[in-house]
Amino acid sequence: MWNDMRLALRIAYQAAEVAERAYTAGDLDVRLKEDGSEVTSTDLEVEDLVRRLLAEAVPDDGVVGEERPEREGTSGRRWLVDPISGTADFVAGRPTYSVDLALEGSLAVSAMPSLGITMAAGRGIGCRVFRGKHEETARVSSRDTVDGARVCLHGKRKPTLEQCVVVDGSTSVLDLITGRVDAVIAADAGLDEFDLACLPVLVEEAGGRVTVIEEDVVLVTNGVLHDAFLALLVARPGVEPGTPGL
């Protein structure tokens, strides 16, 4: 696991440098994909770099990325690449985009170069946050009551949670795993497998829980509050209970 983590961090840092140079220059070649979402030349450049570095280091592993066709492997392992997670933020000049790399089901690295922050987690080895040369163990909050809980909301459908404190969600995963918020709810936010690639490992290794309630409703909490929030959400019309994890 540690060898894979070192590899993932090295690749993520190199890819993040490429992304940050383009972000700083601001000269972005933007086009629309068939689904109407934005993609930039930097998305493609970063994904190509990550694929090349993975092919050199772990040639038997499969790789699937958001912008290129899947490369099937023979090892039974598969890497997921989201070259620019938060392309809309990247294009708009907001510093909350990230470069995400996950070894499916076991390891996740999310680098946010504009903020100087990287989140990394592996099954059984915990979750860490790197801020420059400073490293800290990530741990979710211990709040055990919904009343007054701090919640980030994403998407077109935002549930009314009058008993909670709704806070800014621009760095919601980071805030959740470091205990600054207690829950994150994404409803009709247009999330796909690449947007969610790093989420389960990061959150669960920090002590939290993740549940996909329905196709595009995702609940992330500190774990202690999970069942309470799940009950609140599934009590609403049109929301069905889902499965834990991703």
Image (tube, rainbow, N blue to C red):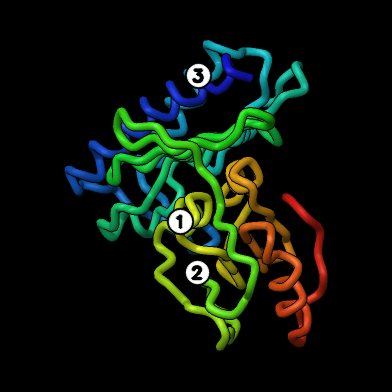
Q: Nearer the viewer, residue 40 or 220?
A: 220
Residue 140's place in the image compared with 166, above or below, is above
Can residue 171 be seen at all in this image of the molecule?
yes
Q: Earlier in the sequence, mark 1 or mark 3?
A: 3
Tell me the quarter of the picture where residue 73 sits: top right
x 58%, y 18%: residue: 2
Dot 1 and dot 2 residues touching (CB under 8 Å): yes
Q: Dot 1 surroundings within 10 Å: few (below 14), some, or many (20 or more)?
A: many
Disc 2 designates what residue?
152
Answer left or right for 200 relative to 236: left
Q: Earlier in the sequence, mark 2 or mark 3?
A: 3
x 46%, y 33%: residue: 47
Element at label 2: strand
Q: Residue furthest left?
A: 25
Q: Nearer the viewer, residue 55 or 206?
A: 206
Label 3 is placed on what type of residue?
Arg
x 50%, y 55%: residue: 179
Answer left or right for 144 relative to 132: right
Element at label 1: helix
- How far is the residue under mark 2 from the one under mark 3? 31 Å
Q: Earlier in the sequence, mark 1 or mark 2?
A: 2
Report x, y in % for residue 235. 78, 83
Q: Which mark is residue 20?
A: none
Q: Disc 1 or disc 3, which is closer to the eye? A: 1
Report x, y in % for residue 122. 62, 31
Q: Which mark is residue 175?
A: 1
Residue 218's place in the image compared with 111, above or below, is below
Label 2 is placed on what type of residue?
Cys
Disc 3 designates what residue?
6
- How far is the residue under mark 1 from the one under mark 2? 9 Å
Answer left or right for 181 relative to 242: left
